[in-house]
Amino acid sequence: MRALLSHRLVPVVAMAAIVVLLPLLFSSAYYYRVAALVFVFALASLGLNLLMGFAGQVSLGHAGFMGIGAYAVAIGPTHLGVASWLSFVIGAALSALVAFVVGRPILRLKGHYLAVATLGFGLLLAIVFTNEARFTGGPDGMAVPRLVLFGSSVWGAQSWYWIIAASFLVGAVLALNLIESPTGRALRAIRDSEVAARVLGVDVAKAKLAVFVVSAIYASVAGSYLALLNGHITPDVSGFLRSIELVAMVVLGGMGSIAGSLVGAALLVVLPQTLTFLHDYEHMALGLIVMAVMIFLRAGIVPTLARALDLRRA
Amino acid sequence: MPAYAKTVAAAIALCIAGATGQASAQVKVGAVLSITGPASFLGDPEKKTLEIYVDDINAKGGVNGQKLQLVAYDDGADANAARTFATRLVEEDKVVAMVGGTTTGATLAMIPLFEEAQIPFISLAGAIQIIEPVRKWVFKTPHTDKMACEKIFADLKQRNLTTVALISGTDAFGKSMRDQCVAVAPKAGITVAHEEAYGPRDSDMTPQLTNIKGKTGVQAVINPGFGQGPAIVTRNYRQLDITLPFYQSHGVASKQFIDLAGPAADGVRLPAAALLVAEKLPDSDPQKPVVVAYTRTYQQKTGQPVSTFGGHAYDGLMIFVEAAKRAGSFDKAKVRDEIEKTKNFIGTGGVVNMSPTDRLGLDLSAFRMLEIKGGDWTLVQ
Amino acid sequence: MPEFLQFAFSGLTVGAVYALVALGFTLIYNASDVINFAQGEFVMLGGMTTVFLGLAGVPLPLAACLAIVATVAVGLALHRFAIEPARGAGAVVLIIITIGASIFLRGAAQVAFDKRFHSLPPWIGGDAIRVGGATILPQSLVVLGGAVVIVVLLWAFIERTLIGKAMVATAANELAARLVGIDTRRIVGLSFAISAAIGAVAGILITPITLTSYDVGTLLALKGFAAAMLGGIGSAVGAVVGGLLLGLLEAFAAGYVSSQYKDAVAFLVILIVLLAIPRGLFGRASVERV
């Protein structure tokens, strides 16, 4: 029994159970929408977690990839006549390509220097999205046509909840596979000590680039979902504050923890909704909660709780 | 399932469940405003105005025998958050109308929701795309950026000036107005000879102004933008000794602009609502009683100078209230019909006459051309 | 020629602002390896507190001093209640804590002050000074001068006082510093206090030019951080050079390339510089222990 509980897919099964059972508590489309948003950001933080938690690299510009995915599903159908689902795929491919091209030189930098480089990259993308109004609609953004699947258009928070939550679960399974693979082990070796890993024969540059590209794809998919869910997209989707939010979600939930990505996303998406009763004091409360979680649960929520309950970490 | 997974599930569910507002028998009016963030300069006076006047209306007995309850959320100028709060207003709070949407981006993101839910939505944002194409349930109170351009160009023609340079903020308001000015210029006989841009948070625009100064043939300069940027541009303008006529936009319509720009603001012209010169209007002006009353109330209750942004919120709320009174109920379809039939409503922005094709109801005469003299607004005749 | 000079003056004015913020980042990083994203809020607090005390009737010089004291208190509180308890946590955790602190301080400023923009009268008023066809405001010279004075004072402090040496020791090797009897906790707290003071002074100096409001901190922190990295984090000279360089890049990009894309150009150049010189312009090479 203990062996069964320790199987690596247990966290995924647990999350799948949550996905299926949660709607029993939903009394209106509002809840579906909030939950759908949670899974969108969980998907993006999952990708970032692979980069930060497992490979130990930091990126302060990850929302830029969300922007690429988001604008792909907006511009494709509107300006280029490409179907939404195809634009979705093209967006992910484009993000992968950009990550590949940009990642090669940037990933040679370390620590805070890498942070600044990724920050600059994210800002550059946000500026392009804001200024190229002819394609992107400028700072006011543009409308996103509905996704048409098998002849009918997908609309409504409820449908999107199931689609996005399912995508997150698929993403979690893929991430788990990556982590347990040789590449995953190489990444963990790099996180612990890059020099030692290189001495052991790990192709550090290749591994870092691979995880950067994968994390970019996750972010792009999340961005596309966000655009389709909202029906409208603005340049803030790839802004600096959004990137910081993603990093906070990863760290608060637990770096290196798949379930942590979900918890971190849930915290930062749901908290502003619950704190509205504080009105002007909402931001003070948010800041205090973020600080408190980090001070008292410094490994992140899920790893700290798991350690406290003495169970295997996700 | 593992203990931590259960706690996670419970936590998420509780959080979402706890986010419900209290059920109440009052009539709820929703407002999603940018109270914090880059547009808080606009959203804060809007919120204060709505709060003051909802209280005022309730103190006088409410509307149709019922008290109003304002449900206001802060979107921080983020369209995604705006959409979430709009969903909350529709699904959870069950509002009968919405007066809000500080920024165009947030408004555009929320429109499909209110159209689908069939709830009247009076927007407080500036761009013309909000009412063009006309949507059944959407109205707005602020003058469009297109009108601002037309008013400025008309004034330029009167002064026999035809070649202009634009220096605009890259924020949504600046960009939108810049686009409208460029589109409207040929028809108005104006040539845009040069353009520059600046970030809304930049602190020095002398490079951009230097380029404008160096461009031959420019006869006047227009600055579409809002917030602190225009104040800095104005200061830099004088610092560089540029003497060409200088026009601001209605995005700076608050006494604060004059305070911040200082003596550099003298001679600057801008199109703005009569609200800014309330006390200086001739007694025969139909808007005078309304704008004077609003100015006094707002300044007394908040201790801050009045701004047209709060004025637009006042207009939006009052148009809704008047429509509800005429409809005799809060039935959304009936109220919407009455809003559309608004005639001769005297607001802070002008005299409003809505129609099935005109969801703003203001014409160019609602904009007054003002000039700053001696640290105060004056009307240009 | 006059255009070039004007762009240069604009760049130096804005660059001096970034330089002061970057200095704050560098100081705290030097003592504790923490990147303090609340640094921008120190600048905001300096300016806003002075403005509001002034509005309440306090004479401006006194208001400025009180603002600096208040900001230092906030800096010490930040260290004592947020950074200290998380000692030993990884770098990213500390960064998130400072981000949480900046959200908190912004939220508090909203409530304590207001959401409008404010200005302060310039220290040296009067018309712009004309040099070679270009103009520069006297206050810009005050800001530049202030940056120089602060760097000199910092240098004197580090090189000439015992506490300064203790700071260098803590930065070099915390354990060794503790072993020789240095109270590293107080040293780190001191670094926060000095950073807060520098931030507050920066806020008071720049407000006559850049105006202030409750959320000026975010963008300043962003640019200050980028400037500090450009110059090489850990080097005070690097921070100042990085800040000035960033300001100049923005101004020249706005003047000669495209005012719409000036920030993009500036960041592109930073990226290129970092790729060529991975430690920043004046950064020290370090040995990575395995």
Image (cartoon, rainbow, N blue to C red):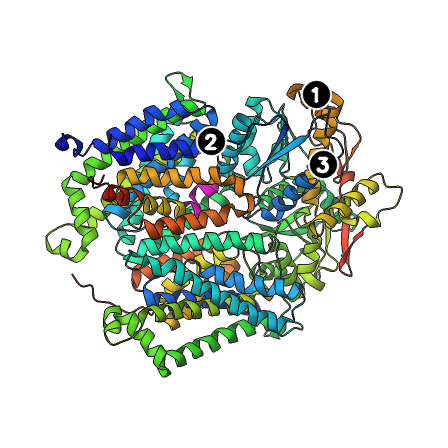
Query: Which mark, by number, is residue C289?
Result: none
The Cα atoms of the two marked residues, 2 and 3, are separated by 29 Å
Tell me if residue B143 can be seen: no
Q: Do the residues under discs 3 and 1 have CB atoms within 8 angstroms?
A: no
Tell me if residue C19 can be seen: yes
Prevailing SS of the magenta stretch: helix
Task: Find numbered disc 2 in the image and state the secondary structure of the residue it sits on.
Answer: helix
Q: Amino acid at mark 1?
A: Ser
Query: Which mark, by number, is residue B315?
Result: 3
| In this view, the mark in front (3 or 1) | 1
Q: Residue at x 57, y 42 (%)?
A: B34
State which quadrant residue C189 falls in: bottom left
Q: Residue furthest bottom?
A: C160
Write down the residue under mark 1: B329
| In this view, the mark in front (2 or 1) | 1
Query: Which mark, by number, is residue A230?
Result: 2
Q: Residue at x 44, y 28 (%)?
A: A31
The magenta-colored residue range is A230-242
Q: Is residue C286 left or right of residue C37?
A: left
Q: Amino acid at mark 3?
A: Asp
The vertical placement of A76 against C193, above or below, is above
The vertical placement of B337 against C53, above or below, is above
The Cα atoms of the two marked residues, 3 and 1, are separated by 20 Å
Q: Position of residue B217 (x, y in %)?
A: 67, 56
Q: Residues within 10 Å of mark 1 (few under 14, many from 20)?
A: some
The vertical placement of C153 against B43, above or below, is below
Q: Do the residues under discs 2 and 1 have CB atoms within 8 angstroms?
A: no
